[in-house]
Image: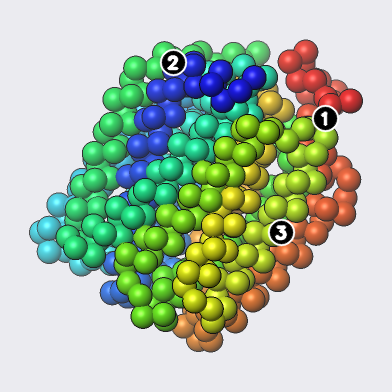
Amino acid sequence: MGLKDAWSIPDFRRLLIGNGVNMLGSSIFIIGMGWTIAEVGGPKAYGMVFTAYFLGHLPLLLYGGMVVDRMPRRTVALISDVSQAVLVLLAMVALMAGYDVINTLLVITFLTGGAGAFSIPAIGALVPDLVEEEILPQANALRGVAMTAAWMLGPLIGGFTVENWGIEICLFLDVLTFLFSAVVLWTIAEIPIQRDKDAESLKEEVAEAWAFVKTQPWLLAGIVMGMIWHVGDSAIEIGIPFIIENKGLGAKEFGIFGAVGAGGALIGSLIAGIRPISKESRGLVFYVLIGSIAWCMLIWAMPIPFLLILLFVLIEGVLGGTLVVIWRTTMSDSVDQHLRGRVNSLDAIGSLIFIPLSPLVGGWMIAETNVLTTFTIAVSIMVLTTMAGLIVPSFRRFERVDSDLFPIKHSQTQSD
């Protein structure tokens, strides 16, 4: 099976195009918003805007996952896209009317974060609904290519747009991409959710998903380690515009930084799709890659030329694109269809739960010390966390584990 086989599935192909355009708009918005906030308010305000997003996002993720496991995933994603288009349009009008830039962007980031709590698990659960298990690595690789292509082009457009025309035009472009994605989703057939039980309460729904997570050591370990790893990662993200500023560069270079990383992720996604990692090796490769990413990030803060920094940004992107395909494929082929929305939500919550605090801490540390000190502490946390995945065999065994509560089905075979 190759990439062509996954691309030949009409509904999956439409999903890739629509979601890719959606991500293009989001990356334009993030670059434009990030540079505007950093320039007007400094490190602490820049940290606050990321905190605002996750404060809107995290509380609704579990509910979003439950909705995704009850309603057709395509419909949930469509409604989310339309809602975000309306919210971003209102923010654009507010800025044009003269409302405070920082407060307006904080509010819109908070609200779109809440809407994203439905679309993210919906898209993640929809992919394995549309393709067969044997081509899931290729499908996830193509999804990675589409998303990273958008994140490569979006920062270039966003950096150029915000520097020449301002944040309002970035928001307008974001509105158009949300609407385009919604129209494309409308053309995809609704796929019913196959459930053995009648609808349960939120507590029971979450308990079932959590019970499944606890039967899978690789999944539980990945969620717990993701909690810690992303503390350092989110602090590093806050430092990027100030690395650019310290070198006397501007919004265009900030966009180039993001585009190079996304270009590397595109390459990594292609590599993982053309030569899929076997089930036996997925976990080992994953943890080696994620540890290497942390070291690349530390080099960004070193007093070296910008072009050399971009080389390590590219390497980090390649490694990141590869490991994302590994994780998504394992989540797709090892989780039951009726659980995917909730398990994706639990995975996202684990990765993001400390992020509302981490950008604030990262912004404070950069303001009080410097970027290099902040990056050194963050990378130390990230590297120490990944060591557990390399040391414990059950953590790096990335495949479905049989259990009495959740027995392996015929389609979920183990490598041995």
x%, y% of residue 134? 67, 19
Q: Could you tell me the amino acid type at mark 3?
A: Gly
- Identified at 47% across, 44% down, the residue is 148
Distance, label 2 to label 1, CA atoms, is 32 Å
Disc 2 designates what residue?
A: 10
Q: Amino acid at mark 2?
A: Pro
Instruction: Looking at the picture, tell me which residue is in the foreground, 254 or 70.
Output: 254
Residue 78 x/y as whole percent: 36, 28
**Please, is residue 245 above or below residue 19 in the view?**
below
First of labels 2, 1 by sequence position: 2
| Residues at marks 1 and 3, CA–CA distance in whole angstroms | 25 Å
Disc marking residue 291: 3
Look at label 1 and name its amino acid: Val
Camera-side residue of 238 and 76:
238
Where the C terminus falls, by quadrant?
A: top right
Residue 39, by quadrant, is bottom left
Which residue is denoted by mark 1 in the rendering? Answer: 401
Quarter occupied by the N terminus: top right
Image coordinates for residue 220, horizontal then vertical, percent: 75, 43
Residue plotted at (88% across, 45% down) = 393
Q: Is residue 392 left or right of residue 130?
A: right
* Residue drawn at x 29%, y 25% as measured from the top left: 183
Q: Residues within 10 Å of mark 1 (few under 14, many from 20)?
A: some
